[in-house]
Amino acid sequence: MTNSYKYLPTSEQDESWGLYVLNAGCSRIAKNEIYPATAHPAHHYFTWDKGRILDEYQLIYITKGEGIFESANGKKKHIDEGSIVLLFPGEWHRFRPDERTGWDELWVGFKGPIMDNLIQQQFFQQRKPVLHIGVHENIIHLMLEIIEKTQREKTGYQPLVAGMVMHLLGQIHTLMKQQSFKAEDITESIINKARVIFRTNIDQDISIEKVAEELNVSYAWFRKAFKAYSGIAPHQYLLQLKIEKAKTLLTDHSRQVKEIAYALNFKSSFYFSKLFKEKTGFTPEQFRKTKT
């Protein structure tokens, strides 16, 4: 995961849509690392001693690690991987990762009468700010897409990402409802965690053996279970993620092919181009021309 964030300007037209996005980002906080990073704007920065009050909703997804959260209405809560933290406008809060583990976080900040109505109808409640949904690849994918769209700020992006936030809220609500009826299968849980590790480390040199070790299962079991569950070997799954990410990056014509190959941790631009053509039928340059 590459740390990134964006704080966004909004127009009256954006706000009239009913829901609009103010910021989005992701961070990997290492063990014993200072939190939060001082690079954030003063209106979002806080210390543990003082906490903060925001004039917006924020949704924070912890995909790895653990920590604590406290708010005026929610009191002190333990946060572990797979937890959603909801922040409410005008409410004091504070949170931080455990120094022994750090954590990976993805977040999006937003406002609007659509969300106000969801709160009024008690789909989400201030007294329940921490929701444990587990680790889900589709939630990760959706949040990374929101982050990517806000980073690029293409014309008309606000209604698009606002719709994605609504989709995200709907997914979370559904997952919470489903938990009342079905306990998650252990194999499904492990495969979901593996998918998240792959997706959040797409720009890293990550080995399948290390993933299995992190999940506390044998490499042989993991490889067999992953293929049986998803229909594809874990190595091929990771390559497919990289190719799909490359397609998105190639639409930015200011980035050279070798730069994209490097960003996705391919051993060379030649290998990247060869693999890209095998998977898509186009060279990176040919694919880029189809997107002009």
Image (tube, helix red, strand yellow):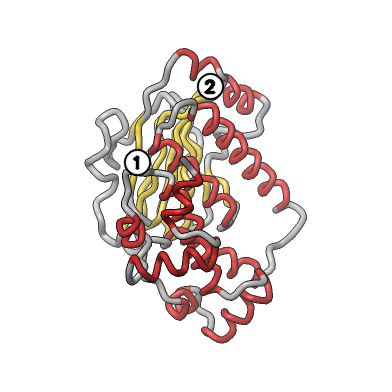
Mark 1 vs mark 2, CA separation in Å: 21 Å
The answer to whether residue 289 is visible is yes
Estimate the x, y position of residue 18 in percent, counting from the top left.
57, 20
Nearer-the-camera pick, 139 or 13: 13
Question: Which mark lies nearer to you, 1 or 2?
Answer: 1
Residue carrying label 2: 112
Neighbourhood count class around disc 2 (C-alpha, 10 Å): few under 14, some 14–19, many 20 upward:
some
Estimate the x, y position of residue 53 in percent, counting from the top left.
37, 28
Label 1: which secondary element: strand
| Number of marks | 2
Q: Residue at x 40, y 66 (%)?
A: 272
Find the residue positioned furthest to the right: 181
Q: Residue at x 32, y 48 (%)?
A: 255
| Three-letter amino acid code of the residue under disc 1 | Tyr
Is 14 rendered above or below residue 178?
A: above
Residue carrying label 1: 5
Nearer-the-camera pick, 93 or 13: 13
| Three-letter amino acid code of the residue under disc 2 | Gly
The quarter of the picture where the N terminus appears is bottom left
